[in-house]
Image (cartoon, rainbow, N blue to C red):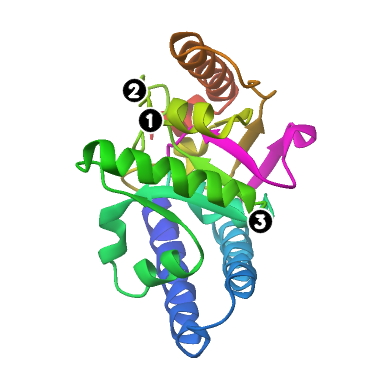
Amino acid sequence: MIAVRSGIFKGVFYGWTALFCILYLPLFWMPRNGLIAFQGIWSRGVRVILRLIMNIRLEVRGVENIPHGGALIAMKHQSSFDTFVMHTVVSHPAFVMKKELLKIPLYGRFCLNTGMIPVDREGGLRALKKLMQDSAQSISEDRQLIIFPEGSRSLPGQKVEYQPGIFGIYKHTQHAVIPVALNSGVYWPKKGHLVPGGVIVFEFLSPIEPGMDKDSFMAALENKIEAASLALLENSDIQKIEQ
C-alpha cells in the first residue's frame, strides 16, 4: 500500500513539475524576482500535493532565526525535499549546487536564470575563488544563500564529513551562519518509497557569529546541526525509519 501511495504521489509530482516546465518556456526572459516568485508557486504546490496524497506536512521551528535579508544558511541534507520547499520558507533563496545539475534540460537554465550558484568541484582554487565572489554577490542582493555542508544527501542518523567550503564563504563574507537541522529523510528518503503520515521538521538554530577560526567554526557547525538532527530523529516514528 505504501508503494502504491508513494507511486501516485510521484506521478502527480512529476506531472505538476512538467506543467511548470511548460509554463516556464514563455517566461524564459522574465526578471529574476518574477522567476523566483514563479518557483515559489511550484514549491507551495509540492507541499499541497504531499499533504493531500501522503499526509506529510512541514513544520518550521526556530522561526525567530529565519533571515529576511541577505544571509548564509548551512543546512542538513537528507532528501530532495530540502531543496523543493525552501522557496516557501525564506523569501529569496539561492542554492550552492553541483555544476553537473546544469546539464538537466530546462532545470539547469532555470537555475542559472534564478541566480543559483553552480560549483565545479574539480575546479580547484579558481572554482573556490568564484564561489566566494558569487556568494558575496548573492548575499549583497539580500538573498538567503543556502549551502549543504555535507556535499550530498545522507541517510537519517548517518555521519558524513562536512566539507570546508562553507568556512570559506563564512570567512569571505563575514556573515553569521544559520544552521538548519531536519528529519526529511525519514519520510522522503534518498531512495525508495515515501512514508505516509508524518511531520517533516526544519529547525533553524541560533546563528554562529563571524570571527571564528576554521577548526572551531567547523566543529561548532557540525555539532549544532548533528545534535539537533539526531534529536529530531529520536522523536520520529522508529517504524517509519525502519521502512
Instruction: Tell me which numbered mark, 2 or 1, is placed earlier along the sequence.
Output: 1
- Find disc 3 in the rendering and name its residue: 88
- Find disc 2 in the rendering and name its residue: 160
Residue 188 lies within the magenta run:
no
Q: Please say if the residues under marks 3 and 2 sit with CB atoms less than 8 Å apart.
A: no
User: Residue placed at 25% from the left, 65% from the top?
Assistant: 103
Task: Specify the segment rendered in magenta.
Answer: 56-78
Between residue 127 and residue 18, name the one nearer to us: 127
Q: Is residue 231 left or right of residue 12?
A: right
Counting from the top left corner in percent of width and height, residue 15 is at: 44, 76
Counting from the top left corner in percent of width and height, residue 225 is at: 54, 22
User: Does 207 sit above or below residue 50?
Assistant: above
Report the Cα–Cα distance between label 2 and label 1.
6 Å
The residue under label 2 is which amino acid type? Val
> Residue 14, located in which quarter of the rendered image?
bottom left
Q: Please say if the residues under marks 2 and 1 sit with CB atoms less than 8 Å apart.
A: yes
User: Residue placed at 63% from the left, 75% from the top?
Assistant: 34
Instruction: Tell me which numbered mark, 1 or 3, is placed earlier along the sequence.
Output: 3
User: Residue placed at 52% from the left, 19% from the top?
Assistant: 221
Question: Dot 1 lies on which element?
Answer: loop
Crowd tier of the residue under label 1, counting other residues whose Cα lies within 10 Å: few below 14, some 14–19, many 20 or above: many
Instruction: Tell me which numbered mark, 3 or 2, is placed earlier along the sequence.
Output: 3
- Find disc 1 in the rendering and name its residue: 150
Question: Dot 2 lies on which element?
Answer: loop
The residue under label 1 is which amino acid type? Glu
Crowd tier of the residue under label 3, counting other residues whose Cα lies within 10 Å: few below 14, some 14–19, many 20 or above: some
User: Does 232 sit above or below residue 20?
Assistant: above
Q: Is residue 55 left or right of residue 171?
A: right
Question: Dot 3 lies on which element?
Answer: helix
> Residue 150, located in which quarter of the rendered image?
top left
Q: Please say if the residues under marks 1 and 3 sit with CB atoms less than 8 Å apart.
A: no
